[in-house]
Image: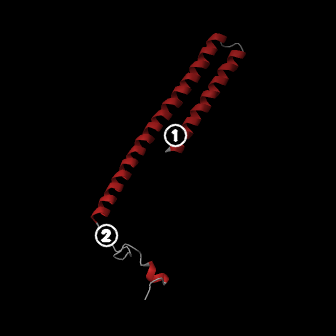
C-alpha cells in the first residue's frame, strides 16, 4: 500500500508544480494580473502542502496504531510463554546434589 500512496503523492506534487509553472507563464505573458497569479500560486502550494501533510499524518497514525497492536500481541505471547515455563516441571540441569556440575569427576581431580 505504501508504494501506491507514495506514487499518488508524487503525481499530485508534480501536477501542482506544473500548475504553478503554467500560472507563472501566463503571468509573465501578461495574460493574468500579477497579484492574481501570485495568489493562485500560493493557493496551489497551500493545497499541495495540505494534501501531503494530511496523507502523511494519517499514514503515520495508522502505522503507530498497527505498531501498538503488534507490541500488545508480543507482550501477550511473552506472558503466555513465561506462564508455560513457570508451570513446566524443572528438568535435570546436570548438577549433582552439592550443586556442582560434577566437574571433579570429569577433570580427574577426584581423590581415591
Picture coordinates of residue 19 (x, y %)?
62, 25
Secondary element under disc 2, as helix, strand or loop, is loop
- Which residue carries the number 1 mark? 5
Q: Quadrant of residue 104?
A: bottom left
- Relative to 80, is 23 on the left or the right? right
What is the crowding at mark 2: few (fewer than 14 residues within 10 Å), some, or many (at least 20)? few
Mark 2 or 1, nearer chain start: 1
Q: How many tags in the picture? A: 2
Q: Is residue 90 above or below residue 109?
A: above
Question: Which disc is residue 41 wearing?
Answer: none
Secondary element under disc 1, as helix, strand or loop, is helix
Q: Is residue 73 above or below residue 88?
A: above
The residue located at (29%, 59%) in the rendering is 83
Picture coordinates of residue 64 (x, y %)?
43, 40
The residue lying toward the viewer, choosing from 19 and 9, is 9
The residue located at (70%, 12%) in the rendering is 30
Residue 85 visible in the snapshot: yes
- Which residue carries the number 2 mark? 90
Which-is-in-front pick, marks 2 and 1? 2
Picture coordinates of residue 45 (x, y %)?
59, 23
The residue located at (40%, 74%) in the rendering is 100
Q: Is residue 102 above or below residue 72?
A: below
Q: Residue furthest bottom?
A: 112
Amino acid at each position: 500500500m505504501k508504494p501506491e500512496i507514495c506514487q499518488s503523492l508524487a503525481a499530485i506534487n508534480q501536477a501542482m508544480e506544473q500548475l504553478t509553472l503554467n500560472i507563472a507563464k501566463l503571468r509573465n505573458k501578461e495574460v493574468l494580473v500579477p497579484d492574481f497569479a501570485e495568489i493562485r500560486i500560493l493557493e496551489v502550494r497551500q493545497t499541495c502542502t495540505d494534501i501531503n501533510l494530511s496523507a502523511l499524518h494519517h499514514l503515520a497514525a495508522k502505522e503507530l496504531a498497527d505498531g501498538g497492536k503488534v507490541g500488545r500481541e508480543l507482550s501477550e505471547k511473552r506472558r503466555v510463554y513465561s506462564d508455560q515455563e513457570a508451570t513446566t516441571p524443572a528438568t535435570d540441569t546436570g548438577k549433582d546434589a552439592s550443586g556442582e556440575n560434577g566437574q571433579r569427576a570429569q577433570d580427574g581431580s577426584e581423590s581415591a
